Each structure stands twice: as structure tokens, then as C-alpha cells.
Amino acid sequence: MLFVAKFGGSSLSSETQFQKVKKIVEDHPARRVIVVSALGKRAHEDNKLTDLLYLLYAHIKHGVSFTALWETIEQRFLTVKQELGLTYDLARDLEALKNELAHSSLTVDYLVSRGEYLTAKLMSEYLGYKFVDAKDVIMFAPNGKVDLNASRQKLTHLLAEDFKIVIPGFYGAYPNGKIKLLDRGGSDITGSIVANCLQADKYENWTDVPGILMADPRIIPTPVPIASITYEELSELSYMGANVLHEEAIYPIRQLNIPIHIKNTNEPDANGTLICDQTAEKSEMITGIAGKKDFVSITIYKNHMSSELGFLSRVMDIFKQFNINIEHVPTGIDNIGVIVSAASVEKCLYDLTETLKVQLKANEVSVKEQIALITVVGKNMISSIGLSGTIFQALGQEQIRVLLIAQSPRGLNVVIGVQNDDYIPAIQILYKELVECHLG
């Protein structure tokens, strides 16, 4: 049996957290592949090593003195080494990196990747595991996309032996060896790539939360943890802002139906959240609520639109010309609403609406701004009679106007549009009505 266990920066912020990780790894013999992020925050006012390294690169490029900043970075690593009593020659590697800072060939990707690299070096000795550099196993194609086949070829030779390895997350390399970073939060992606390539039995993602929550804890004080969730449900929640797991980390795992287990390093015995293709039947009506603010609704009105062949296609083509991604398309008989992020049309809204009006010969093109979208997700919703009515009634009683409501064809989620100002109270009302009342 093989588990790939990824530990985030909060799990690696100090020597105490390293000790917790070691106990977790030793508690199950299947945890033979460990992926680590860079050292995280020790306290709220502290800084992540990744942020410090980005800041260091900015200092270098702008000719600003970075002596104090470098000493802070250096001391973070040295403190962990000293407290854990490790023998790894960290000072040598730090000195080598310091010398590289003056090279004109220094790239931000290389410098920032050293956070994960040095953390993995420390962790490999502490666990007694072999260190495997991500640049040797996480391969990028020339177009900048992860090459799963090449990565698989690099990783599968490890299966030939009884291996125990630590891999730094967040980066890989092009065929020429040049370091390339993944997206921010990319250690999640590294873990899922490794789990896919090694056909792991489980991918564990260890963090500082008790799992995926049914709502944003900044809005709902004590949201209920989700015990189990399908990949499809998670994709819907992630797309609308639930960010415990990087969205791109789901797909390599889902290909092979490998379960993902979100666990809390500080409470390792807690159940966490299990993510898989199919979950056991649940009594809960919904799985979770998530949302985002700052959308724009552009509505196109034209008489006899419904009988005009290819009209929707021409609408889509115009948005494509402006390189704008479309979020939702609610429609009527003679009107189409197109929902997009406000940021995507910030510099072209006037030109876009004029183009829509002229090219489509529309009677009117109207714009509504400051819209928030809230998604209610759950595989049981399709069998829940009167859910939309419950939503309308609950929001209406609190004088919150619903600007749009749409259900996905598979019945997995309902999307509600409200004004930005109503975003937080709307989520609080929906959580109370759909979660608290149902559990009660």
C-alpha cells in the first residue's frame, strides 16, 4: 500500500510542526512519499518563506539592499535545523544560494523554489527518507504545461525498490533542467502528480484546517466540516472560492479515482474530509456553500432572438474576440444574459457593449455591476423538492433581492446572484436555512 502525503507550509512552520509531521508519517507505514511546501507562518504576524523569497527577488532586481531580509530567511532555516539537531550542511547550501543572488542569470522561479528545496532537505534527514529533487521528476513540456508521461517515466523507477522519499513541492523543470514554478499553492499539484504517476492508494493533504468546511469560516463562525465529498462537488465549490485544495490538484487524481484525504496536522485523529468519485449516501440536503463577489451581468435584448439561427454562437464569438471568459449564460425568449468577472471587462466594457449592439443588431444591451454569485452544491439537491422556493423565501424574508438563479443540468448545484452588498448576509441566511435548520 502506498500513500502520498503532502504537508503544507502551516505544517512546516517550526521545529514543533516538524515533530508533528514525523509522528504522523511514522503512524502509518504506507506514508512512503512525502511532498513538502516551504516553511510557513509561525504566527499571524509572521511571513511565509515563499513570500520572503519573492520579496528578496524584487529587492535584487530593483537594486535595494537585501541584507536584513536575507538574514531573516537564513535564520528561519537555521533555527529549524538547530532545534531538531540535524547534521545536514545547511550553511553550505545557504552560502551557495547567497552567492547565486549576484548572478544575472538568477530567475525568480529558481530563487523561490529554494524554499521548498531546503525545507525538503531538512525533512528528508529528519524522517530518515531519501531526498528526491522535484526538478528530476516533475517535468514540464516546452509549452509550460506539466508533462505527465515524462514525469511518470522519471518516477516509476522508484517502484522497483522499497522506497521512502521526500520531494519538494511547487516546482519542476523543463527538459533542459531550467526550474519552473507551478501556480501559487502548487505543492498540492505536485502531490497529485506524484500520486497519479505512482498510482498511489491514497493522496493525503495535510494542512491546518479540519477538512473542507460547508461554508467560509470568515462568514460563518463555526461551519460544519464536510465528512465526504465527490470530485464533482469539490470542483464546483473550488471554482466558486472554496480553496482548501488547489483546483488543478483534483484532475491528475480523478483520472485514476485515487481518494484524496484532507487532514489537520494539528489534530491528526480528526476525520477530515475524504474526496472520491462516489461517496456513501448522506442525509444532508447540501454539501456546501461558496461564492465570489464582483461580477458583471451583460444582457442582450433582440426581438425574435429565439428564432435566429446561430445567435448564441455569435454572442460567444464576440466575447472570445475580447478574450473574456464567460461564467454563466442565463437566457430568455428574446434575451441572453452573460455573466463575467468585473476584472475581465474593466478596460473594455464600453467597447464590448457597443460591439455586441452593432454586430448583433440588438435592440438593447444593458449592464448590471456589483453582482455576487453564490453556489449551493450537493448531489442530493436534485431530489430535494422545493429547494429553489426555499431559497427565494429565505432571502425574500430578509429583503435580499435575487438577481438570477440557475441550476446545473446535472442538478449538482444552484447558482444565485445577489448584489455585492448582500453577499455576506445571503450566505448567512442560506447556511442557517439549508444547513443549521436541516441538521437541527
Image: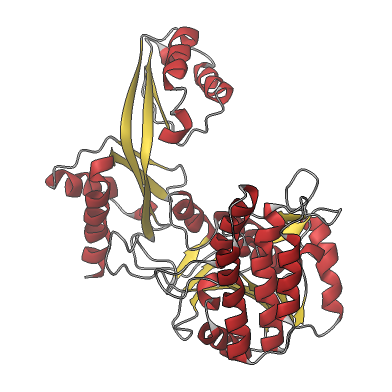
Left/right placement of residue 193 relative to residue 248 reads: right
Above or below, 391 relative to 95:
above
Residue drawn 31% across the image and 67% down it:
223
Locate the N terminus and report the quarter of the image it occupies. bottom right
Front one among 175 and 217:
175
Q: Position of residue 351 (x, y in %)?
A: 46, 16
Above or below, 411 relative to 263:
above
Say which quarter of the image contains residue 439: bottom left
Front one among 157 and 47:
47
Q: Position of residue 303 (x, y in %)?
A: 37, 9
Colouring of the image? secondary structure
Q: Position of residue 213 (x, y in %)?
A: 39, 66
Residue drawn 37% across the image and 53% down it:
290
Is residue 226 visible in the rendered image? The answer is yes
Front one among 55 and 135:
55
Locate the C terminus and report the quarter of the image it occupies. bottom left
Q: Position of residue 117 (x, y in %)?
A: 70, 70
Number of on-image labels: 0
